[in-house]
Image: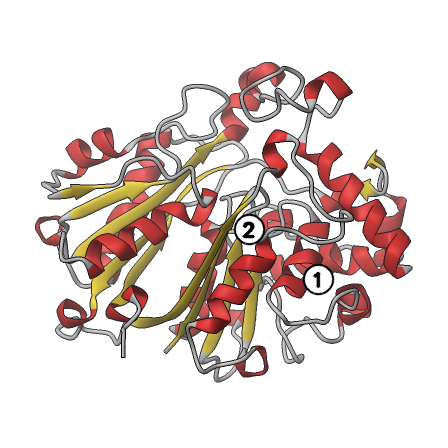
């Protein structure tokens, strides 16, 4: 029997810097905070780290990705034998997937993966720091039609979903209300004041039908995840987290290529791949950390992952009774990107680790043993984690 590469890899450590809006610390300082925390968390030292990568690599504008692997390597005193290259393919999860493959192939044994953002500081300096409002590589095909932001794109998906499945704003708003309830229990979340569904409905429309609370929030901060080969992880002080399976897919939404009826994502292929590589099923999940760059993405991902049948995610989340703590499927227990802050999915991975290592404090899901993490709105990646 062929063993999938992820089966030989473990998550051995995780760290996150303090999150600010904006932060008083530089992007590099935040990166070092998170990376050093992850290394210490695993019981390792910088000398043990022989692999390093980040998503997406240094980007020189808007605070989107202000720190690359080279300056992190030099600042930490690392001497990696493997450094990840472009992670464009499967977007946010690309760096994790590349690191898994590098470890499984024997190129390295301990890979540090980090994601740093300084978008809040960039926006504080100038509102023009964001690529929104001007044509860039990512939106060059949509800007001529006044779709200047991903919000415009996903508003079309939300409207199509509402029309086809008779979903309502009250149902979609449950994602935002639940996120705030979870963030209230997370001391590192940006927005911790609870909101009601009435607050959600009263918030301003950004691009119909998406409201203010449907959109994630820019922050300053860094998250780091340490991946290790299972043989190397056996000697570490704490049992590592197993990567049961992974799934990935890539579509052309970010370049204006839309297929189907706007109620599904290419993430469907990532979901199929994820479940094809394990004997577990969606019924075995204890927690879900699902991408929420916009709340409609969470509903679409839930269906792509088989947590809900097609068209049923909106009714599943309505009222938050099935997605809160103690419910059937606790969802985005850190507050997600809507309330904790936009790490482009890496905050979701960090929170999954916190839950499976039973150290999430007031938001801890009792006896959590399995968690699915899904990231991406343009490229798609998913991990099934278990302890």
* Disc with the residue nearer the chain's start (1 vs 2): 1
According to the picture, the residue beneath numbered tag 1 turns out to be 178
In the rendered image, residue 226, in percent from the top left (x then y), is placed at 27, 56
In the rendered image, residue 200, in percent from the top left (x then y), is placed at 83, 50
According to the picture, the residue beneath numbered tag 2 turns out to be 189
Whether the residues at callouts 1 and 2 have beta carbons within 8 Å, the answer is no
Q: Is residue 149 above or below residue 383?
A: above
Instruction: Pick the residue in front: 15 or 56.
Output: 56
Task: Tell me which residue sits at (17%, 39%) in the image.
Answer: 76
Q: Secondary structure at mark 2?
A: loop
From the image, which quarter does the N terminus lie in?
A: bottom left
Q: Secondary structure at mark 1?
A: helix
Apparent side of residue 296 relative to residue 58 in the rendered image (left or right): right
| Residue 209 seen in the current view | yes
Instruction: Pick the residue in front: 4 or 312.
Output: 4
Task: Tell me which residue sits at (80%, 56%) in the image.
Answer: 172
The mark found on residue 82 in the picture is none
Instruction: Pick the residue in front: 251 or 351.
Output: 251
Q: Is residue 88 above or below residue 110?
A: above
In the rendered image, residue 240, in percent from the top left (x then y), is placed at 28, 72
Q: Is residue 106 above or below residue 66?
A: below
Q: Tally the marks.
A: 2
Task: Tell me which residue sits at (31%, 69%) in the image.
Answer: 4
In 3D space, how far apart are the residues under numbered discs 1 and 2 (Cα atoms)? 14 Å
Nearest to the eye among marks 1 and 2: give it.
1
Apparent side of residue 85 relative to residue 335 in the rendered image (left or right): left
- Please identify the quarter of the rendering in which residue 222 is found: top left
Q: Is residue 331 above or below residue 84?
A: below
From the image, which quarter does the C terminus lie in?
A: bottom left
């Amino acid at each position: 029997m062929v063993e999938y590469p992820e089966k030989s890899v473990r998550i051995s450590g995780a760290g996150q810097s303090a999150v600010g809006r904006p932060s008083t610390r530089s992007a590099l300082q935040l990166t070092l905070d998170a990376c050093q925390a992850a290394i210490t968390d695993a019981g390792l030292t910088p000398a043990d780290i022989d692999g390093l990568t980040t998503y997406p690599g240094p980007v020189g504008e808007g605070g989107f990705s202000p720190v690359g692997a080279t300056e992190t390597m030099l600042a930490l005193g690392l001497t990696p034998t493997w450094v990840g290259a472009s992670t464009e393919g499967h977007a946010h999860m690309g760096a994790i997937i590349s690191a898994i493959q590098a470890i499984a192939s024997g190129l390295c044994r301990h890979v540090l993966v980090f994601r740093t953002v300084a978008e809040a500081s960039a926006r504080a300096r100038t509102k023009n720091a964001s690529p929104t409002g001007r044509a860039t590589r990512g939106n060059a095909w949509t800007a001529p039609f006044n779709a200047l932001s991903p919000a415009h794109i996903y508003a079309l998906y939300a409207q199509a979903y509402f029309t086809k499945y008779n979903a309502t704003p009250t149902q979609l708003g449950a994602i935002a209300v639940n996120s705030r309830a979870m963030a209230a229990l997370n001391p590192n979340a940006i927005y911790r004041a609870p909101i009601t569904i009435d607050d959600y409905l009263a918030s301003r429309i950004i691009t119909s039908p998406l409201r203010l609370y449907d959109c994630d929030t820019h922050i300053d901060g860094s998250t780091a995840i340490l991946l290790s080969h299972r043989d190397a992880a056996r000697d570490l002080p704490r049992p590592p987290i197993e990567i049961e399976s992974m799934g990935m897919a890539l579509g052309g939404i970010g370049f204006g290529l839309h297929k189907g009826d706007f109620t599904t994502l290419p993430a469907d292929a990532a979901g199929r791949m994820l479940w094809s590589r394990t004997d577990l099923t969606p019924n075995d999940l204890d927690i879900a950390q699902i991408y929420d760059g916009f709340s409609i993405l969470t509903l679409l991902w839930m269906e792509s992952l088989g947590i809900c049948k097609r068209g049923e995610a909106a009714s599943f989340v309505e009222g938050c009774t099935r997605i809160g703590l103690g419910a059937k499927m606790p969802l985005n227990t850190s507050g997600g990107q809507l309330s904790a802050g936009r790490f482009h999915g890496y905050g979701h991975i960090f929170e999954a680790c916190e839950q499976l290592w039973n150290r999430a404090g007031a938001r801890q899901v009792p006896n959590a043993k399995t968690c699915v993490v899904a990231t991406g709105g343009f490229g798609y990646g998913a991990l099934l984690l278990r302890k």
